[in-house]
Image (cartoon, coloured by chain):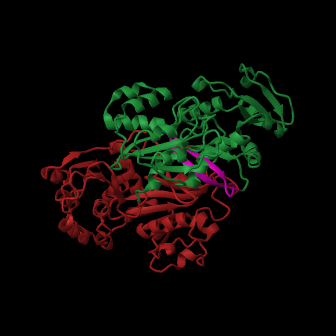
Chain colours: A red, B green
Amino acid sequence: MVIDTQFYMKLALDEAWKYQGLTYPNPAVGCTILSSQNEILSVEAHKYAGAPHAEVEALKSAYFRLTDDSKILELHESSQIHTYLLQNHNNCFNGVSLYTTLEPCSHIGKTPSCASLISKLGIKKLFIGSTDSNPQACGGAEIAKNAGIEVESAVMQKECDELLKPFDLWREERFVFFKWAQRLNGTIDGGLISSLKSRTLVHAMRDVCDLLVIGGNTVRVDRPTLDARLVGGRAPDILIYSRTKEFDKTIPLFSVEGRKVIISDDLSLLKDYKNIIIEGGGKMFELSMQFADYHLCFMSPSTGGDSNFTTINEKLEILNIQKDEQDIIMWMKQKGNN
Amino acid sequence: MVIDTQFYMKLALDEAWKYQGLTYPNPAVGCTILSSQNEILSVEAHKYAGAPHAEVEALKSAYFRLTDDSKILELHESSQIHTYLLQNHNNCFNGVSLYTTLEPCSHIGKTPSCASLISKLGIKKLFIGSTDSNPQACGGAEIAKNAGIEVESAVMQKECDELLKPFDLWREERFVFFKWAQRLNGTIDGGLISSLKSRTLVHAMRDVCDLLVIGGNTVRVDRPTLDARLVGGRAPDILIYSRTKEFDKTIPLFSVEGRKVIISDDLSLLKDYKNIIIEGGGKMFELSMQFADYHLCFMSPSTGGDSNFTTINEKLEILNIQKDEQDIIMWMKQKGNN
């Protein structure tokens, strides 16, 4: 195995994908920090809006590793961590390299700019995956260069761009992904499939998205709630994709407070939303091929059920694989899609 | 993400799993080496019988990284690498840590003992996953301890034992695994599924195994050759699992030279073989649950085909996931199996 720049960027990428779908209105970003002697000091990601950026999380862990100063572990607010690092770094970051999947932000918003923080800590080398095209945050590489940091851009850019794409689409217009849970043998019927951990992750995604599209048949058969109760979160609006408007209103999803439920087969309604999760079975999977940007499959390593959920011919491409205690979590896109 | 002993052992584990099934009569083993400053110098595995052990491969890469002496890259024989390292190390390994999924061998066979090599290079710390219970090779930890190396045993022992189990079973009696290729939607019909890279890996496994068990129906429908031509390898003997003995002898598998083909539904014939790969469809999958030790699935991220290959209720457990350019490669075992 080759241990090189790509290896360290891949660590940052894998960490960031764990939080894909959870970080809006921020992008999913990962960061790896190496000591001057190339020891991995930290691999961290941006976890949710309001949490520190990936670089700040990684600098915090790296600082603790380098100094053993546990006071920093008590700080969770990004601005507090910024201030603490600036006051206490005592040149401990001299010679350090930082790998980030996205150009460090130049934007002073909820948190101070990562680029300026990095520039003031004595960091030697900055490896960047995607260039930030967001006019509010771009220019971080330039700030670092001007501070004398060696900057190498476009490291695993294709993979970093794939990680960033949901955010870019969301910012420009909207991001739509189809999520389903299946067994190894391609079935989705016959009761609970995913682990509690997988289901909790889906609830966290629902909490962040603004519209959940679901097939009419799934609503009738499964009588779902489709909320975010496992994370105590907000339930998204629902679009039941159906020609007929007749539904038993005692189905739990209709009684969730603060949610709008639309029954329609008019997909132009999606234009009112920006972060859209599609759930459902074979029909919705087939339909999703026309308008989903990414596909997310939770696969349980079990067999059973009655029949495979689809037999349409489609080719996908794996963007990232993760494993929780039980399931495999696969982010994919249609093959050939940019 | 926590960067600790387990992280480094996991790198060794993942590298070793890539060669699972290819290393007989040796076990699959992985090795990670860290500098005195905890830089990852190398992550290597044992690749095939006759190739250097994982520790030797990793020491070779680490030596080059530490010294830039490219002469060692020209050496491929284990004994040459041993000799070269002993003569030229010049204390470059002082303070180095070595992580190995299996206790370094004490056995002088085709290659000198890894334990004695490690003991003579000034290595500081040795992390071991599984203890070697092979009477011909055990005792490596003791040799290292006696040489003053700090030894920590049982690091990720469960995972390292799972990696080692095929070899242990093979040594004691036999190792049997069921291998299949499927699409995301659980289908196995309708033409070629796996990438060339996946198929080449299967051919390399066939080259190493001594018996291939295949369902009679698969033979009739697919008319396979079941050899190892993609790696220029030896074709294993075949057991066609079938009650009826009638087969069209123009099916290519019957014409492969130097191979024995048995047609029988008597699985007690397996006792004459030690490394057995089962291929086939749903019926063989179902049957395999009774006697396969591990399951190996090559999954293409595509949908299509006609129907899922099985609907029996089974729970498996993922042991390792790899990804090649296209497919996901999953080693699994039945849930609850030791």
At 37% across and 64% down in the image, what residue appears? A47
Residue B326 part of the magenta-drawn span:
yes
Whether residue A204 can be seen here: yes
- Residue B211 in percent (x, y) is at 72, 32
Q: Main secondary structure of the magenta part?
A: strand
Compare residues B66 and A314 and report the one nearer the observer. B66
Where residue A114 sits, quadrant-wise, is bottom left
Q: Which residues are magenta?
A: B314-338
Judge from the rendering whether residue B135 lies leftward or rightward of residue B1; answer left or right. Answer: right
Taking the image as drawn, is residue A321 in sight?
A: no
- In magenta stretch: residue A208: no
Name the quadrant containing residue B255. top right
Vertical placement of B72 versus A18: above or below?
A: above
> In the shown orientation, is residue B175 left or right of residue A281?
right
Residue A70, picture quadrant:
bottom left
- A251 versus B278 height, above or below: below
Foreground of the two, A93 or B110 = B110
Above or below: residue A117 compared with residue B89: below
Q: Quadrant of the C terminus of chain A?
A: top left
**Residue A320, image x, y percentages:** 45, 50
Residue B278: image location, x then y, percent: 71, 39
Residue at x 34% of width, y 62% of height: A46
Q: Which of the pair A211/B261 is nearer the observer? A: B261
